[in-house]
Amino acid sequence: MKLIRRMGHGFTLVEMMMALGSGSVVLASVVIASVALQRSFAAVETYSITEGDQLRVLDYIALDCRRALTAQVSSNTLTLTLPVYYNSASNNVPNTPALNNGILAYGSGSVTVTYAQSGGNFNRQVVVKDSGGTTTSTKTTAIATNVASFTVTAIDLTSSLSCSIMFFPTFRYTSGNGTWRAGATAPSDALGSDGDLYVVDATATDTSTTGNVYRRSSGVYTLLQNVKATSVYCNTFLRNAGARQ
Amino acid sequence: MKNNDTSRQEGSVLLTTFLSITILTMICATSLYIASQNATGGAQTASWQQSLTAAESGVDLAIRALNTNDWSNWRLSSYPSGTTLPTNEPSPSPTATAAGIPDSSHYNLLPSSKCSMTMSAPSEGALSTSAWVTVDTGGMSTAQDTNSKQWYRIRSTGQASITGPARASMNKLDNDLRNTIALKFNRKNANSSTMGPTRTIEVIMQPIVASGWARGITLKDWVSMSGSGLVDSFDSSNPFKSSTINGVLGQYDVTKRQSHGDIGIMDSASADLRSTYVYGSVAYSGTTAVKNTTNVQGTISTPFTPTISTVSAPTWSTFTTVAAGNPVTLAAGKKNSPAYYKVTGDLTVSGGQTLAITDDGSGATGQEIYVWVTGKLTTSGSGQINQASNVHITWYVGGDITVSGSSYNNQSNVASNLTINGYGTNNKFTDSGSANFIGTVNAPGYDATISGSGSFMGAIITDTLTISGGASFHYDEALSTGASSAVGNYAFASWFEDNSDTARLIAY
């Protein structure tokens, strides 16, 4: 009975205040930690996706450059011609190499692979033509999205190319969720509308500004910060062009 | 009643705790899922690169076997059908050992057990890699080669062996590129007990015949360069490495410049490049390094110890005697019946004069002529030697060789059609003409000077070499081949990675 009576006394105001205060602190900590963890997870995930995109783009370009017969660069479009290695009439089994007076060739017709940016996509297009020049298949694949810019430079078309690809930053700015834009210089205030974001891409003449991110607010673009690690560069060796043939 | 109130309070604590644990568990699970996907993606990328390295190692072993004719560990096998290579590694491996290069009805196989590597420490990718390699003629015959030599096909499949459970990347694009639905999937050998990403490379190897002209500049002593010229290379036999200019095939084109303008120096004591651009490598012997090599684009290495054959005067017993001075015409003969001439004394083509090196009048291609000059060979002023485009000439000169003025007009524009052998010692070779000299000079006892505005296109072997003025040196890589020579080694003529997956209708 003594015990029951004591429990029935409830808490004092001081006890209640301390309990509520402690509880609030604990709950607030949990909420803050949860939000921070969520943000961290989101950042890691987008970083992982972007890194995967970068590796995929570089691996595709390197793969095709290594096996290309010729390369052309025009207006940041990379066009490669590949040997006609697969026999499309026979379940794409490899063609037998044909040697004629010292000139080596696979199959007949042509295979052209083109890399170019289209909006935010980075496309790889494969066009196969028969010996009469008729297109037998065209396949375009967006091998990366969220692309800000793609530049390709012919260091020496008989040996190597230099490529760079830049992705839009993937962070979520709390008060800016408008359209992403990119360019070689700081944005003009006349561009877009409030909330839009802008990044100085890999074509920047002043390379120190590459990665500068701006947000438009009240009709004016303001520099937010410089974002690193959104560009990848590669120099790719053209093996066939350097081969004895 | 008061007891009941107490129970409700305890229940709310339990619920709060339960919810908190649930939220934290979900956060942890999400974190682990993302981390797992990232790890899988990383492992896929890493092991995919490892399999390429393994495949390239297999190609390297095949090239080594071709170049050394050492086929240890290789097996000899017949084709499974026709001349089609197997798509999976033959198991068990053929028991017959390969004794040499394969003929047209067999292929040589290097089993994966003989080309494997295991990492001693854990890595992000696979712990072991291997490759199985085939070498065959690929249906190519010697009749299809310009030098009647055999070409070979190397096909190497590298594999990174993954341990543990099957894992799949979360990205279809990655799976399309790397052709691995899961890391345990082996698209090149579905029956294999060893799973993991595979990559296949097919390389066509071209025989490179041995030649004394494997290098642009070979010197028994030193080189001294100055002026605005440079040293580089081109290939007159390859339209990708030369151009058609004024209707003439195989011309040097600076936009197609190659980087095999190599220089070999046997005594570097006085060698000085004076920062001249050399698009090639420099090899030397001597106690001091070659000076001012800042603009050498290739490697600089030592030592350089080739064997340079001595050039001797001919020992012909049958020839046509030509009086010294300026003969007007020397006619060549057909390839199987060359024309031989001997000039006792100096041969001089001075201003206003022309020496015509013609064919026999038949217009047949590949005509041959040999001319032996016991004294000096000189062109000067507007004097000129005109060599017909269908004639191949070999000079033997015992005295100084001077090509100046309008110089020597090799109308074929092919360096291999003009060879000047200098067999004297302490003599000079001078090319100071305003026109290009297109040919080869083999004069190990001569001090050579290339100056003036014309360039030298071909290759040269002398004692010393001085290049000055605006003259440049363009090595013609086509000189490194020759039908009459033996195969020196093999170089790749084609490189292709087969990234297809027929099961998933993926080709290029």
Image: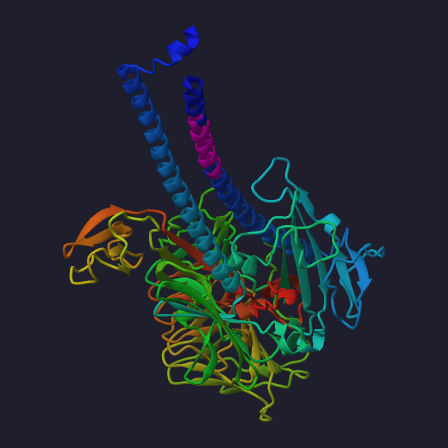
The correct choice, above or below, for B69 with respect to B317 in the image is above
The region drawn magenta spans B12-26
Residue A154 image position (x, y, % from top left): 39, 64
| x 60%, y 56%: residue | B180
User: Which residue is nearer to you in this view: B388 or B59?
Assistant: B59
Q: Residue at x 77, y 70 (%)?
A: B104
**Residue most toward the top?**
A2
Asked if the magenta segment contains residue B20, the reply would be yes
Q: Based on the displayed image, in which of its 4 quarters is residue B207 positioned?
A: bottom right
Tell me where residue A32 sits by quadrant: top left
Residue B357 in the image: above or below residue A94: below
Asked if the stretch drawn in magenta spans residue A152, the answer is: no
Q: Give the number of marks.
A: 0
Viewer-proximal residue among A133 and A18: A18
Q: Position of residue A122 (x, y in %)?
A: 41, 63
Pick whichever, B79 or B31, lies toward us.
Answer: B31
Examine the rendered structure and indicate whether residue A196 appears above or below residue B5. below
Task: Considering the whole magenta stretch, tell me its main secondary structure.
Answer: helix
For the question of whether residue A85 can be seen, the reply is: yes
Image quarter in which the N terminus of chain A is found: top left
Q: Position of residue B252 (x, y in %)?
A: 44, 73
Vertical relation: B281 (above or below) A94: above
Q: Is residue A104 visible?
A: no
Left/right of residue A202 with respect to residue B212 in the rendered view? left
Name the quarter where the C terminus of chain A is drawn.
bottom right
Q: Can you give x and y, in whole percent of width and height, for residue B236 in the image?
A: 50, 74
- Left or right, B334 with respect to A182, comes to right
Identify the image's colour scheme: rainbow, by chain, secondary structure or one colour: rainbow
Residue A36 vs residue B161, the one in the foreground = A36
Extreme residue toward the bottom, this view: B362
